Image: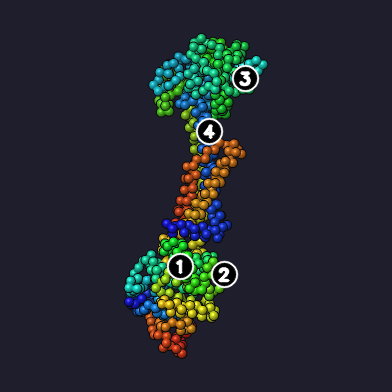
Amino acid sequence: MSLIVCRDLVKTYRLGEMEVRALRGISLTIEPGAFVAIMGASGSGKSTLMNILGCLDIPTSGTYMLEGTDVSTLGGNSLAEVRNKKIGFVFQSFNLIARTTARENVQLPLFYRGISSREQRTLALRALERVGLAEREKHNPAQLSGGQQQRVAIARALVTNPSIILADEPTGNLDSLASQEIMDTMTQLNREGMTVILVTHEEDNARYARRIVMVKDGIIQYDRPSSEMVGARLIPHEMSV
Amino acid sequence: MSFLLMTVLVAFRVLGRNRMRSALTMLGIIIGVGAVIAMVSIGEGAKAAVQAQIASFGTNVITILPGSMTIGGVRSGHGGAVTLTIADMEELRKIPGVAEAGWARRDTMQIVHENKNWFTTINGVPPSYLVIRNWSLAMGDFFTQSDMDSASKVALLGSTVINNLFEPGEDPIGATIRIKNMPFKVVGGLAPKGYDTRGSDQDDVIFIPFSTAERKVMGTRFLGSIGSGFLSAESPEQMAPVIDEVIRMLRQRHKLRDDKDNDFTVFNQLDVAKIQEGTSDSMKLLLLAVASISLLVGGIGIMNILLVSVTERTREIGIRMAVGAKRWHILLQFLVEAVVLSALGGLIGVGLGVAGAKAASNIAGWPTIISGKILVISFGFSALIGVFFGLYPANKASRLNPIEALRYE
């Protein structure tokens, strides 16, 4: 069974009188264990696609089957539950809660599961170990470097053992060394069997993925293995940012 | 349940981060609750004191004075004419609902015991008067009907009189005092009543049999005229009908035409009590208004700070939603913060209120009564304020769109 099956996803926004069509019919299938990069310039619709894939939003029309369940018509609370169980987010700006320790940040998704605080702590420490930050559990985000903060965020995404890690420009706020570390961590997680969806406009990052989906003007421009791209420009010249 | 507990812990930590802000936010509630408790305690204490004074006058007592008095007005000529007699009172005793009838004549005189003397009020009364006016004995006995019949020279002394005529520790019972140079035997000492509602010392008094007063001490224009009459009703409900009947009967007995004013005045202790209670009730209402406004302002303060907090923490709310917080999780989180703020404020307010009431009784000497009920009610009310004023910001937080909240700078 495929992990993600999308059929004809359409998303339109109303901005006053104007109707903006962010997605104009996207069909996409992702198998478990995949490492997919979703690429596109700003305004291409890739953020909208990511929001829908991440169950933060629902499509105007079309269907989205996540692990065999149709999540394209769910209400806010059901979507929250799906996010809690199946999706781990990694954001460009880390999005850790300030003045809260690394471990408590990692614990956050478990907090909404109603499991005992002892169990929360154990799972959070294990996730921090996986990203190599167990000894920083008591540090606040402000006491951590950018790369460390992003690794805490990855631990938070991992802690629930989700079906998908959804990373939105995870290296956008990092220097090249930290970026490489984060991408290595992602690759490592994927090798361990985790499905990773990477939303990015950076070619360098997209190279880590095994499949590249290029979105332009709300439709998929192309969708092919990254091996076909070796040595070639991923983004057509006129689109590069 | 454990989620609620953890939410409470988180709320304490969040509020602990902004200690100054939290403290200032709570101030309105603290002042409101503290004021309510201090004021109610002082009010209840004052009320109890007034009630004790009123009770000391005797229960369900109706007072009849000869002469007329315009109610609440200028003419206060009661006592001016001798229009009330023992015969009147004997007749009024027969009214249904009347338990006892008594009467008195009073005069102020010098009394002497050995080398001491004291100027005080002498009351000539029948034994029933002492029952109606709720006098009890500290020592000795009341005088009896046979003392009345034989006009014996016996006296009951109030505690103030005893203190001024006798040495401390000296037993007044059986001692001889002189009134108008006549020897009187002291038969009893009265238990102190303290000051009355008008602030005069009720214990500065001597009682002698009415007949003795009439025939030997005060003299009279004609036998049986009295200075004041007293009736006790069987129950508070009987007061009004008995008063009506008293007026009707006295007018008839005094042969007053319809166009004539009463030549007597009837009033009861309930009227006095009502005036007192009216004052304390309007005072209480005023205090309640002040306290309510303070609590309202406190509640608005909480709402305001929470709205600021929701805006400040929009990003955090977005993160929480992204990792799976449902609407009610967010709603509860902010609601709990509001309730923790207001309940904590309430708790501090309760402490301050109790301390204030204690200070009022210790420093100013006011009687205060701190009831557990009011503590619980004010604390509960402050928590309710948190729920009420927290609901709007909490709801606002829970309705944020996670995508926009995550993007919020």
Q: Identify the residue shown where x is 52% and y is 60%.
A: B14
Residue B170 — which label?
A: 3
Vertical placement of residue B184 versus B14, above or below: above
Q: Which of marks 4 and 1 is in front?
A: 1
Residue A123 — which label?
A: 1
Three-letter amino acid code of the residue under disc 2: Gln
Three-letter amino acid code of the residue under disc 1: Leu
Q: Identify the residue shown where x is 47% and y is 18%.
A: B128
Q: Nearer the viewer, mark 3 or mark 4?
A: 3
- Report the Cα–Cα distance between label 2 and label 4: 64 Å
Q: Determine the chain carrying the residue at label 2.
A: A
- Report the Cα–Cα distance between label 2 and label 1: 22 Å
Quadrant of the rendering where the N terminus of chain A is positioned: bottom left
Residue A143 — which label?
A: 2
* Residue A49 quadrant: bottom left
Badge 4 element: helix
